[in-house]
Amino acid sequence: MRHRLRDQGHDGLVTSTAPRARILSGSFLATAVLAAATLVLPTGFAVRGPGPTEDTLGAQNDVPLVEIRGAETFPASGELRLTTVSVGGGPVSDVFAADVLWAWLSPERSAMPVEAVFARGVTQEQQQQQSQAQMLTSQQAATAAALTELGIEVPARLTVAGIPEGSGATGVVEEGDMLHTINGAAITSHAALLEQLTAVTPGDNVALSVERGGAPTDLTLTTGESTTADGRRRAALGVLVASEFDFPIDVEIRIEDIGGPSAGMMFALAIIDRLTAQDELAGEVVAGTGTIDIDGAVGPVGGTEQKMHGALRDGASWFLAPERNCGEVVGVVPDGLRVVKVSSLHEARAAITAIGAGDGDSLPTC
């Protein structure tokens, strides 16, 4: 009897727990399937990683990135590598949970809400068009800034492209006005305009002569204030100026599959290097990033951390970073890369010259 009871007990144990075991096994399987599915579902994140770099002194697909005609050029050793960021998400491509997890675990990558990277409602085609337009504008500015840095005058026709809200120019100038003179001095180039404004105290009035609708028009405008790349105060017209350049030297910049404005400084440095007999780099590999204004100011960009990793991967020992990006640089510089902060093309030119001369350790860092 007791043996029978033990058998019954044994049989009861098996028959009573088998469904529970199956339920538990099914739960674990469902959880695993759900977790796996989650990893391959699109997310609302954008992921950034190191993109390709290109030597602006070299060639892409056997085509020189920077080609100069109409002036003597000189050979250059070393490399000036523009850096890029590879971006996924938004209108570009789907980003999955696995990609986000990888970005969180990798020091070379970052993940953020897609709205922080892409404007809402922008299509992939619109994004590409905007990026290419920014690249073309950057190339024009790089050429103008480089030639101006070398003391070569760059004639330009300057027109009013916009008037920011609250500007003292509101109601005085109009979009489309072509600037002719300021305080009697001819505005023949952007550099000439800046030179005249340097002599004006911010807040003072200036006499402006413009061409409006084909007719000359004299105006009196109250100046605003701006800050130069080296931190000096300077009067400003308070308008957005579009420049149509008449370059005395033919500079052609050709690059494929890369857009945006952040290569401006590296293109400008390549133009300078090609047009000067001095071998500034002396064989060093210098990478960098930064927008460039016509007056040579270097502006901040996104993805600096990823660009540093891309620079190191492609052989750079030095990295030129915009001073206004220093907050993103401190504490995340990869081992083997030295960062130099710059705020102007003049400072960047001095930096690569010092690096080539072996004096890079004395340069300011972030």
Image: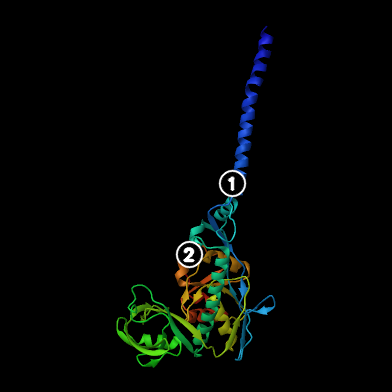
Q: Secondary structure at mark 1?
A: helix
Q: Amino acid at mark 2?
A: Glu
Task: Measure how far apart labels 2 and 1 are at the Cα level.
Answer: 31 Å
Q: Residue at x 58, y 61 (%)?
A: 92
User: What percent of the width, then of the height, locates residue 89?
Assistant: 56, 58
Q: Is residue 181 visible?
A: no
User: What percent of the width, then of the height, locates residue 154?
Assistant: 50, 89
Q: Residue furthest left?
A: 204
CA neighbours of label 2 inside 10 A, class few (<14), some (14 to 19), many (20+): some
Q: Nearer the viewer, residue 88 or 127?
A: 127
User: What percent of the width, then of the height, locates residue 339?
Assistant: 52, 70
The quadrant the N terminus occupies is: top right
Tell me: residue 35, above or below residue 270: above
Q: Residue at x 58, y 75 (%)?
A: 286
CA neighbours of label 1 inside 10 A, class few (<14), some (14 to 19), many (20+): some
Tell me: residue 190, above or below residue 23: below
Q: Is residue 260 visible?
A: yes
Residue 328 bears which disc, if any? 2
- Which residue position holds label 1? 38
